[in-house]
Amino acid sequence: MKVAVYSTHKFEKDILLHTAEGKHELIFLEPQLSLTTAALAEGCKAAVCIFVNDDGSKDVFQKLSAIGIKYVALRSAGFNHVDIKAANELGIRVARVPEYSPYAVAEHTIALMLALNRKLIKAHNRIRELNFSLEGLTGFDMHNKTVGIIGTGKIGKIVAEILHGFRCSIIACDIMPDNDWAKRYGVVYTGLDSLCG
Protein backbone atom coordinates (compact mmCIF):
# COMPACT_ATOMS: atom_id res chain seq x y z
CA MET A 1 0.00 0.00 0.00
CA LYS A 2 1.21 3.51 -0.85
CA VAL A 3 0.96 5.88 2.11
CA ALA A 4 1.34 9.67 1.97
CA VAL A 5 3.12 10.75 5.16
CA TYR A 6 2.34 14.43 5.81
CA SER A 7 4.39 16.76 8.06
CA THR A 8 7.41 14.47 7.82
CA HIS A 9 10.25 15.20 10.23
CA LYS A 10 13.81 14.00 9.64
CA PHE A 11 13.97 12.31 13.05
CA GLU A 12 11.13 9.93 12.23
CA LYS A 13 11.96 8.86 8.67
CA ASP A 14 14.25 5.95 9.56
CA ILE A 15 11.86 4.41 12.08
CA LEU A 16 8.92 4.78 9.69
CA LEU A 17 10.88 3.19 6.86
CA HIS A 18 11.99 0.35 9.13
CA THR A 19 8.42 -0.26 10.31
CA ALA A 20 6.99 -0.19 6.78
CA GLU A 21 9.75 -2.27 5.20
CA GLY A 22 8.30 -4.78 2.76
CA LYS A 23 4.72 -3.87 3.66
CA HIS A 24 4.08 -0.30 2.52
CA GLU A 25 5.59 2.29 0.24
CA LEU A 26 5.89 5.60 2.08
CA ILE A 27 5.70 8.92 0.24
CA PHE A 28 7.25 11.49 2.58
CA LEU A 29 5.73 14.96 2.35
CA GLU A 30 7.05 17.92 4.32
CA PRO A 31 3.90 20.07 4.06
CA GLN A 32 1.10 19.73 6.57
CA LEU A 33 -2.16 18.19 5.45
CA SER A 34 -4.63 20.92 4.48
CA LEU A 35 -7.25 21.60 1.84
CA THR A 36 -4.52 22.75 -0.54
CA THR A 37 -2.14 19.84 0.12
CA ALA A 38 -4.67 16.98 0.25
CA ALA A 39 -4.19 16.47 -3.50
CA LEU A 40 -0.56 15.43 -2.85
CA ALA A 41 -1.97 12.05 -1.72
CA GLU A 42 -3.54 11.51 -5.16
CA GLY A 43 -1.40 8.51 -6.13
CA CYS A 44 -1.78 6.73 -2.81
CA LYS A 45 -5.38 5.64 -3.27
CA ALA A 46 -5.67 4.14 0.21
CA ALA A 47 -3.92 5.79 3.16
CA VAL A 48 -2.38 8.92 4.61
CA CYS A 49 -0.41 9.35 7.80
CA ILE A 50 -0.70 12.66 9.67
CA PHE A 51 0.81 14.45 12.67
CA VAL A 52 -0.59 16.78 15.35
CA ASN A 53 -0.71 20.00 13.33
CA ASP A 54 -2.28 18.48 10.24
CA ASP A 55 -5.85 19.43 9.35
CA GLY A 56 -8.24 16.54 9.93
CA SER A 57 -11.40 18.56 9.31
CA LYS A 58 -14.50 17.44 7.45
CA ASP A 59 -13.57 19.48 4.36
CA VAL A 60 -10.12 17.88 4.16
CA PHE A 61 -11.56 14.41 4.73
CA GLN A 62 -14.06 14.96 1.91
CA LYS A 63 -11.18 15.83 -0.39
CA LEU A 64 -9.21 12.76 0.73
CA SER A 65 -12.24 10.53 0.28
CA ALA A 66 -12.75 11.86 -3.25
CA ILE A 67 -9.25 10.67 -4.23
CA GLY A 68 -9.80 7.24 -2.68
CA ILE A 69 -8.27 7.55 0.78
CA LYS A 70 -9.81 4.99 3.14
CA TYR A 71 -7.38 5.08 6.08
CA VAL A 72 -5.84 7.85 8.17
CA ALA A 73 -3.06 6.85 10.56
CA LEU A 74 -2.20 9.42 13.23
CA ARG A 75 1.33 9.78 14.53
CA SER A 76 -0.09 11.11 17.79
CA ALA A 77 -2.09 9.91 20.76
CA GLY A 78 -4.34 12.97 20.65
CA PHE A 79 -7.00 13.21 17.97
CA ASN A 80 -8.68 16.54 18.75
CA HIS A 81 -7.55 17.81 15.32
CA VAL A 82 -9.52 15.08 13.56
CA ASP A 83 -13.25 15.15 12.79
CA ILE A 84 -14.03 11.54 13.72
CA LYS A 85 -17.72 11.93 12.89
CA ALA A 86 -16.90 13.11 9.36
CA ALA A 87 -14.40 10.26 8.95
CA ASN A 88 -17.05 7.72 9.95
CA GLU A 89 -19.62 9.25 7.60
CA LEU A 90 -17.13 9.06 4.72
CA GLY A 91 -16.06 5.49 5.54
CA ILE A 92 -12.54 6.56 6.45
CA ARG A 93 -11.00 4.51 9.24
CA VAL A 94 -8.81 6.43 11.69
CA ALA A 95 -6.10 4.87 13.86
CA ARG A 96 -3.94 6.60 16.45
CA VAL A 97 -0.97 5.95 18.70
CA PRO A 98 -2.44 4.42 21.88
CA GLU A 99 -0.06 6.37 24.14
CA TYR A 100 3.37 7.89 24.43
CA SER A 101 5.80 6.65 27.05
CA PRO A 102 4.47 8.28 30.22
CA TYR A 103 7.98 8.00 31.65
CA ALA A 104 9.50 10.00 28.78
CA VAL A 105 6.92 12.78 29.17
CA ALA A 106 7.23 12.83 32.98
CA GLU A 107 11.04 12.86 32.86
CA HIS A 108 10.96 15.68 30.32
CA THR A 109 8.62 17.60 32.63
CA ILE A 110 11.13 17.24 35.48
CA ALA A 111 13.97 18.27 33.15
CA LEU A 112 12.07 21.45 32.23
CA MET A 113 11.38 22.19 35.90
CA LEU A 114 15.07 21.85 36.73
CA ALA A 115 16.11 23.90 33.69
CA LEU A 116 13.81 26.73 34.80
CA ASN A 117 14.84 26.49 38.43
CA ARG A 118 18.58 26.44 37.68
CA LYS A 119 18.26 28.96 34.82
CA LEU A 120 20.12 26.66 32.45
CA ILE A 121 19.10 28.43 29.23
CA LYS A 122 20.17 31.83 30.55
CA ALA A 123 23.46 30.34 31.83
CA HIS A 124 24.08 28.58 28.49
CA ASN A 125 23.51 31.80 26.54
CA ARG A 126 25.88 33.70 28.81
CA ILE A 127 28.61 31.11 28.36
CA ARG A 128 28.27 31.37 24.58
CA GLU A 129 28.88 35.12 25.01
CA LEU A 130 31.94 34.34 27.21
CA ASN A 131 30.12 35.87 30.19
CA PHE A 132 30.81 33.66 33.19
CA SER A 133 29.04 35.82 35.76
CA LEU A 134 26.81 33.95 38.22
CA GLU A 135 24.71 37.07 38.84
CA GLY A 136 21.01 36.23 38.55
CA LEU A 137 21.62 32.52 38.00
CA THR A 138 21.00 31.25 41.51
CA GLY A 139 18.31 28.61 41.65
CA PHE A 140 16.95 26.81 44.68
CA ASP A 141 16.80 23.29 46.08
CA MET A 142 13.73 21.30 45.13
CA HIS A 143 14.13 19.46 48.45
CA ASN A 144 11.28 20.34 50.85
CA LYS A 145 9.50 22.57 48.31
CA THR A 146 5.77 22.21 47.69
CA VAL A 147 4.87 21.23 44.14
CA GLY A 148 1.38 21.27 42.65
CA ILE A 149 0.30 18.78 40.00
CA ILE A 150 -2.88 19.20 37.98
CA GLY A 151 -4.00 15.74 36.92
CA THR A 152 -2.71 12.48 38.35
CA GLY A 153 -3.16 10.19 35.39
CA LYS A 154 -0.25 8.07 34.18
CA ILE A 155 2.07 11.03 33.54
CA GLY A 156 1.07 13.07 36.58
CA LYS A 157 1.64 10.10 38.88
CA ILE A 158 5.14 9.50 37.51
CA VAL A 159 5.98 13.20 37.90
CA ALA A 160 4.81 13.01 41.52
CA GLU A 161 6.82 9.84 42.15
CA ILE A 162 10.00 11.49 40.82
CA LEU A 163 9.34 14.61 42.91
CA HIS A 164 8.75 12.37 45.94
CA GLY A 165 12.32 11.19 45.42
CA PHE A 166 13.42 14.84 45.67
CA ARG A 167 11.58 14.94 49.02
CA CYS A 168 9.10 17.53 47.78
CA SER A 169 5.72 18.07 49.38
CA ILE A 170 3.19 17.30 46.69
CA ILE A 171 -0.34 18.63 46.35
CA ALA A 172 -2.51 17.54 43.46
CA CYS A 173 -5.86 18.14 41.87
CA ASP A 174 -7.75 15.50 39.92
CA ILE A 175 -11.41 14.86 39.20
CA MET A 176 -10.82 11.19 40.09
CA PRO A 177 -8.35 11.12 42.99
CA ASP A 178 -6.43 7.90 43.60
CA ASN A 179 -6.22 7.98 47.38
CA ASP A 180 -4.39 4.65 47.79
CA TRP A 181 -1.62 5.78 45.44
CA ALA A 182 -1.55 9.24 47.07
CA LYS A 183 -0.89 7.75 50.50
CA ARG A 184 2.15 5.85 49.21
CA TYR A 185 3.76 9.04 47.90
CA GLY A 186 2.51 11.55 50.46
CA VAL A 187 0.37 13.34 47.87
CA VAL A 188 -2.40 15.51 49.28
CA TYR A 189 -5.38 16.12 47.01
CA THR A 190 -6.89 19.59 47.03
CA GLY A 191 -9.07 21.77 44.85
CA LEU A 192 -7.73 23.66 41.83
CA ASP A 193 -8.13 27.08 43.50
CA SER A 194 -6.19 25.89 46.53
CA LEU A 195 -3.47 24.32 44.37
CA CYS A 196 -2.99 27.51 42.32
CA GLY A 197 -3.36 29.88 45.30
Image (cartoon, rainbow, N blue to C red):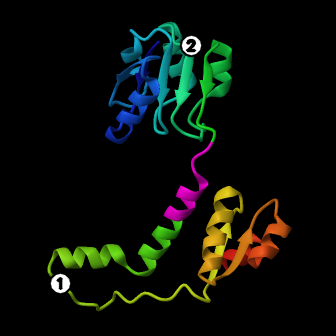
Location of residue 84 by image quarter: top right
Point 49% across, 39% down: residue: 52
Residue 143: say if magenta.
no
Q: Main secondary structure of the magenta part?
A: helix
Which residue does the numbered mark 2 point to in the structure image? 70
Q: Is residue 9 visible?
A: yes
Q: Quick one: SS at disc 1?
A: loop
Q: Looking at the image, is 16 positioned above or below residue 78?
A: above
Residue 151 is left or right of residue 137, and the answer is: right
Point 71% across, 57% down: residue: 153
Depth check, front residue: 122 or 155: 155
Residue furthest toward the right?
180
> Of marks 2 and 1, which one's residue comes earlier in the chain?
2
Q: Looking at the image, is 53 positioned above or below residue 144?
A: above
Residue type beneath disc 2: Lys
**x, y percent for residue 18:** 41, 29
**x, y percent for residue 80:** 60, 38
Q: Quick one: SS at disc 2?
A: loop
**x, y percent for residue 64:** 49, 15
Location of residue 145 by image quarter: bottom right
> Magenta residues, as a range?
99-108
**x, y percent for residue 70:** 56, 13
Which residue does the numbered mark 1 point to in the structure image? 131
